[in-house]
Image (cartoon, grey):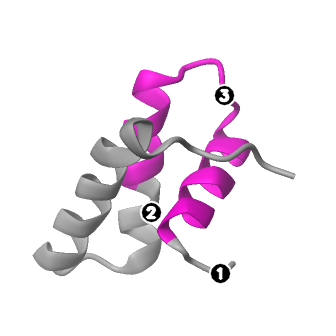
Amino acid sequence: MAKRIDKDEFCAARAAYREQIEFGSEKDTALNLATIVYQQRHPCVPAGQAREMVGAALGLGN
């Protein structure tokens, strides 16, 4: 199971996701960008795990 993302660590990823949705991007594309933003701050977290964590923190079901 994925680790929980602390609220402060998640702010940039959440903002990236929200802005992409407002821009008109698909949810999957927005999640990809939010995952990239999270990984820029946590480069040791594998991509799949980071995507799962960000998705869970956003309340998205896969």
Q: Earlier in the sequence, mark 2 or mark 3?
A: 2
Looking at the image, which residue sits at the far top? 44
Which amino acid does the dot numbered 2 rest on? Leu
Using the image, tell me which numbered label, if any, was put on residue 31. Answer: 2
Q: Earlier in the sequence, mark 1 or mark 2?
A: 2
The residue singled out by tag 3 in the image is: 45
Q: Position of residue 13 (x, y in %)?
A: 36, 48
Q: Position of residue 42 (x, y in %)?
A: 52, 23
Numbered disc 3: secondary structure:
loop
Q: Is residue 49 shown left or right of residue 35?
A: right
Q: Are marks 2 and 3 in contact (CB under 8 Å)?
A: no
Q: Earlier in the sequence, mark 3 or mark 1?
A: 3
Which residue is found at the position 74% from the left and 43% from the top? 3
Which residue is found at the position 67% from the left and 56% from the top? 52
Few, some or many residues within 10 Å of mark 3 (<14, 14–19, 20+): some
Q: Are marks 1 and 2 in contact (CB under 8 Å)?
A: no
Q: Nearer the viewer, mark 1 or mark 2?
A: 1
Numbered disc 2: secondary structure:
helix
Which residue is found at the position 71% from the left and 47% from the top? 48
